[in-house]
Image (cartoon, grey):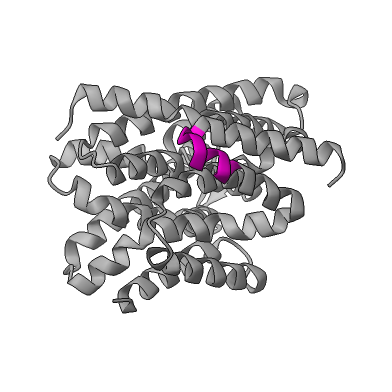
């Protein structure tokens, strides 16, 4: 099912994602300008990659002249940071599998952490229309690109995110979205396992492995529970 | 290794952006493609039901712990506001407000 009404509902529901998105979009634009990327390069990254953490790290390995080796490094780094999308996709599969291929392909291009989290709430409350997911993704994509452009030109004038607590906007939003998922102590036991493993891995392994390790620990716990 | 092939701007940049976009897109579709190959047993279904919440906890908990006391209190306030109002923006605003107040006082 894919309706215009659900698309619009998804777009509306993505509003709480805007503060974080605008802050990080501007931070990316500013960082790109500072690293010496051209406007077209910064715009191209935000438009086609549309993944904040990966874009930020991509800037760290950005080159003036690219060799095949550099490109492979860039792809590997990108894939490692975005590997969490594999998990998001796994949760979306039962929802999107009956969609026509081109529409599913376009829908997944716009998949982000924020669009996923709003869609999960919609689905938990009985929603079944994938137009909602598409609406979230599209509505968040526009300000992401716009904020990157603004950040590119406004660079030095952007206030430090930490001053308004905006560096923690993502964890706070995610925690807020966890509340309606609460169905009692027993169904939350896998979350406990996920949290413990992610803390451990975060302490001992650099990078973003902790997300996947923790999430898989949660799945494993869910599987062994009756 | 492969330094004998070089791509200068603007073609090099275009290629790099395309490569990065491709790697990201493969991650976006990979999970869905993978699940079409997996047989969903009742056990696997129980595991998958725990996945969304587990992703959220695994992503946020280390960041909250890193953020210290002010982050912890802010998240708690945000969650309580959300539980009372069921409005995401209210929860988010309560959390960010608490955090900026705590930081202003140097917590």
Q: Position of residue A79 (x, y in %)?
A: 45, 56
Q: Residue at 77% of width from left, 25% of height from top?
A: A156
Residue A92 sits above or below residue A103 on the image:
below
| Residue A169 location, quadrant | top right
Would you identify the image quadrant in which residue A216 lies?
Answer: bottom left
Whether residue B104 is visible, yes or no, is: yes
Does residue A28 appear anywhere in the picture? no
Quarter of the figure that contains the C terminus of chain A: bottom left
* Left or right of residue A116: residue A147: right
Please provide percent x and percent y for residue B30: 31, 56
Q: Quadrant of residue A139?
A: top left
Q: Residue at x 27, y 26 (%)?
A: A7
Residue B79 part of the magenta segment: yes
Q: Which residues are magenta?
A: B78-88
Q: Residue furthest bottom?
A: A224
Q: Is residue A49 above or below residue A186?
A: above
Viewer-nearest residue: A76 or A199: A199
């Amino acid at each position: 099912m894919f309706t215009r009404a659900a698309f619009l509902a998804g777009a509306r529901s993505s509003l709480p994602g805007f503060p974080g998105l605008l802050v990080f979009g501007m931070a990316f634009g500013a960082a790109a300008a500072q690293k010496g990327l051209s406007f077209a390069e910064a715009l191209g990254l935000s438009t086609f990659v549309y993944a904040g953490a990966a874009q930020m790290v991509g800037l760290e390995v950005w080159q003036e002249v690219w060799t095949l080796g550099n490109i492979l490094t860039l792809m590997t780094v990108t894939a490692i940071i975005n590997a969490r999308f594999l998990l998001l996709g796994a949760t979306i599969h039962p929802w999107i599998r009956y969609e026509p291929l081109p529409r599913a392909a376009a829908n997944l291009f716009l998949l982000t952490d924020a669009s996923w989290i709003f869609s999960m709430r919609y689905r938990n409350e009985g929603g079944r229309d994938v137009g909602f997911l598409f609406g979230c993704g599209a509505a968040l994509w526009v300000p992401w690109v716009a904020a990157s452009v603004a950040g590119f030109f406004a660079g030095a004038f952007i206030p430090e995110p930490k001053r308004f607590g905006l560096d923690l906007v993502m964890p706070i939003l995610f925690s807020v979205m966890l509340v309606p998922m609460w169905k009692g102590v027993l169904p939350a036991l896998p979350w406990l396992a996920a949290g413990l493993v992610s803390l451990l891995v975060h302490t001992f392994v650099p990078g973003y492995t902790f997300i996947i390790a923790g999430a898989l620990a949660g799945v494993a716990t869910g599987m062994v529970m009756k | 290794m492969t330094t004998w092939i070089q791509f200068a701007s603007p073609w090099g940049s275009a290629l790099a952006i395309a490569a990065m976009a491709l790697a990201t897109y493969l991650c976006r579709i990979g999970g869905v493609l993978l699940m079409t190959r997996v047989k969903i047993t009742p056990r696997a279904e129980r595991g998958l039901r725990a996945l969304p919440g587990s992703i959220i906890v695994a992503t946020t908990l280390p960041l909250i712990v890193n953020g210290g006391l002010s982050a912890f209190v802010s998240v708690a306030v945000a969650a309580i506001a959300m539980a009372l109002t069921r409005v995401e923006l209210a929860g988010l605003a309560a959390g960010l407000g608490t955090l900026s107040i705590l930081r202003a006082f140097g917590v």
